[in-house]
Amino acid sequence: MSSNYSDAQREQVRKLAMLGVRQPDIAQVMDISMSTLTRHFARELKEGLVAATERVGSTLYEQAMAGNTTAMIFWMKTRGGWRERDRDDRNGAVIVNVTGALNATTERRDRDRDRDSDDN
């Protein structure tokens, strides 16, 4: 579908989508309707979202591999299927044993670093 929108307008939509601006707000900034936005800028909306997800995911991964415990736990909960589901029925306390998994992740990171330094 051909449209009369410039490359600069397309890049603006992509950047706004990448920054997480909501589609109704992008449409308002561009002074177009939501239907026009989704019809003529679908590719830019998708590319912006994918670019942002890639950048954040990459940063999160690097933080987890560098030993950031919070990033490690977040990664394992979202990508590794971890859940805080075990409870001590006597007092309702949540029991989460992450030490073994964190140690395994740290060991894997160190092994990867050693392998990378051997390759150089």
Image (cartoon, rainbow, N blue to C red):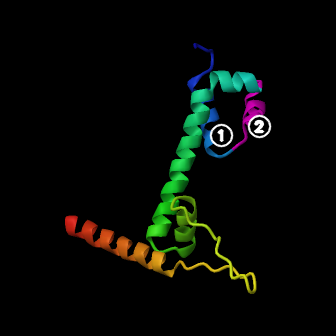
37 within the magenta span: no
29 within the magenta span: yes
**Furthest residue toward bottom:** 90
Q: Give the prevailing secondary structure in the magenta stretch.
A: helix
Question: Where's the N terminus, which quadrant?
Answer: top right
Q: Nearer the viewer, residue 46 or 32?
A: 46
On the image, the x and y values in percent for residue 53 come to 55, 48
Question: Where's the C terminus, which quadrant?
Answer: bottom left
Give the quadrant of residue 44. Answer: top right
Residue placed at 57% from the left, 47% from the top?
A: 52
Tag 1: amino acid = Leu
Q: How far apart are marks 1 and 2 (CA)?
A: 9 Å
Q: Is residue 65 left or right of residue 74?
A: left
Task: Note whether residue 37 is visible.
Answer: yes
Task: Note whether residue 120 is visible.
Answer: no
On the image, the x and y values in percent for residue 112 come to 32, 68
Q: Which of 13 and 118 is in front in this view?
A: 118
- Few, some or many residues within 10 Å of mark 1 (<14, 14–19, 20+): some
Q: Mark 1 points at which residue?
A: 16
Secondary structure beneath dot 1 equals: helix
Tag 2: amino acid = Asp
Q: In this view, does 102 lie to the left or right of 111?
A: right
* Residue stretch in magenta: 21-33
Give the quadrant of residue 42. Answer: top right
Q: Is residue 101 left or right of residue 29?
A: left
**Furthest residue toward front:** 89
Residue placed at 64% from the left, 46% from the top?
A: 19
Q: Name the residue under label 2.
A: 25
Secondary structure beneath dot 2 equals: helix
